[in-house]
Amino acid sequence: MSQISAAAVKTLRDRTNQPMMDCKAALTEAQGDMEKAVEFLRKKSKDVVDKKFGRETAEGRIAIYIDPAKKIGAILEMRCESPPVTKSDAFVKVSDDLARQTALQNPTSVDALLTQPFVDDPKKTVSDHVGETVGLIRENMKPARFARLTGLLGGYVHHDGSVGVMVQVEGDKADAQMLRDVCMHITARNPAYGRREDVPADIVSKEQEIAKSQIAADPKNANKPPQIVEKIAEGKMKTWFAENVLVEQPFVKDDSKSVGDLLKSNGLKLVKFIRFKVGELR
């Protein structure tokens, strides 16, 4: 294959925080495949943290609307051109308006949302409403994505509007502040999955393989019997789940219990969560 480029080495270094020579060796071993190179480094060292990419430069804010009585809610990302606009009252309002529109009218896509009659003034469309704000601020803006949930819901938007989370739970009733605290936890800890059963089987298999490779690479484990090695691998997987699965993460406000324990003590069970960050591509 062609020579590994310096740009590729730098990308892998930025993603894993490993030495440049190790990154070059990993890319060479993986024949230039970035994902395989990350996996190669992780197998070699337990200290490698994969910093996921898939972001673009963008300005905007996240808006959430929840109607507890109707048990409906929506989270929406609204984009604009410049940072000052994200804090303007007009942009905050139109973002909130579109989140409410999404919750109440259940559009099937961003394009469908824009063509709907605006709930507060059906004589105009949502696109017309956005256009009025564009005319006022003199800057382009548009909804980028949204999600809608039904049931017992909680939500939280970070003070600068850059991150928002909506969570759905099962149970008879839910304390709004407690669900807000769970959403704040998700904002801070950014779990990859809600529950252990949400983790794809191939991801679990891959992590088990990485755990065993890390154990084998540690000289201290050379003479340990297979059953002990298996126990160490189970411990590594338990740690991985506690880092990546919401209900198994220690709760940020009280790390003596997990988020799952907190929900269970309130008679609740997690269904799912949605976390939006402005500019994220996923």
Image (cartoon, rainbow, N blue to C red):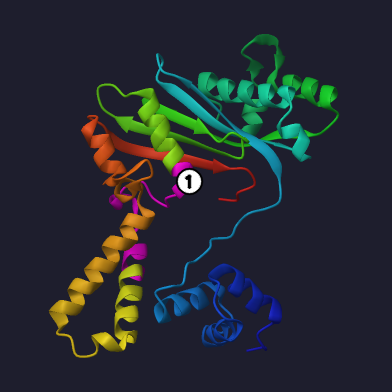
Image height check: is 93 above or below 63?
above
Q: Residue at x 40, y 34 (%)?
A: 181
Residue 168: percent from left, percent from top = 37, 32
Q: Is residue 61 left or right of residue 268?
A: right
Above or below: residue 266 compared with residue 227: above
User: At 34% from the left edge and 79% from the top edge, which residue is drawn?
Assistant: 214
The quarter in which the N terminus is drawn is bottom right
Majority SS type along the magenta span = helix
Q: Which residue is mark 1?
A: 188
Residue 260 belongs to the span the image colors magenta? no
When asked about the image quadrant of residue 71, the answer is top left
Amino acid bearing label 1: Ala
Q: Residue at x 32, y 74 (%)?
A: 211
The front one of 131 and 80 is 80
Residue 194, magenta (yes or no) = yes
- Specify whether 156 is left or right of 91: left
Which residue corresponds to the image point at 43% horizontal and 73% vertical from the top-left?
47
Q: Can residue 201 be seen by looking at this rendering?
A: no
Q: Callout 1 environment at 10 Å: few (<14), some (14 to 19), or many (20+)?
A: few
Left or right for 115, reference 193: right
Disc 1 secondary structure class: helix
**Camera sees residue 156:** yes
Residue 19 position (above or below residue 132): below
- Residue 19 in the image, given as x and y percentages of width and height: 57, 81
Q: Position of residue 165 (x, y in %)?
A: 48, 37
Q: Which stretch did the figure color magenta?
A: 186-206
Q: Kindly indicate the quadrant of the structure image that contains residue 146.
A: top right
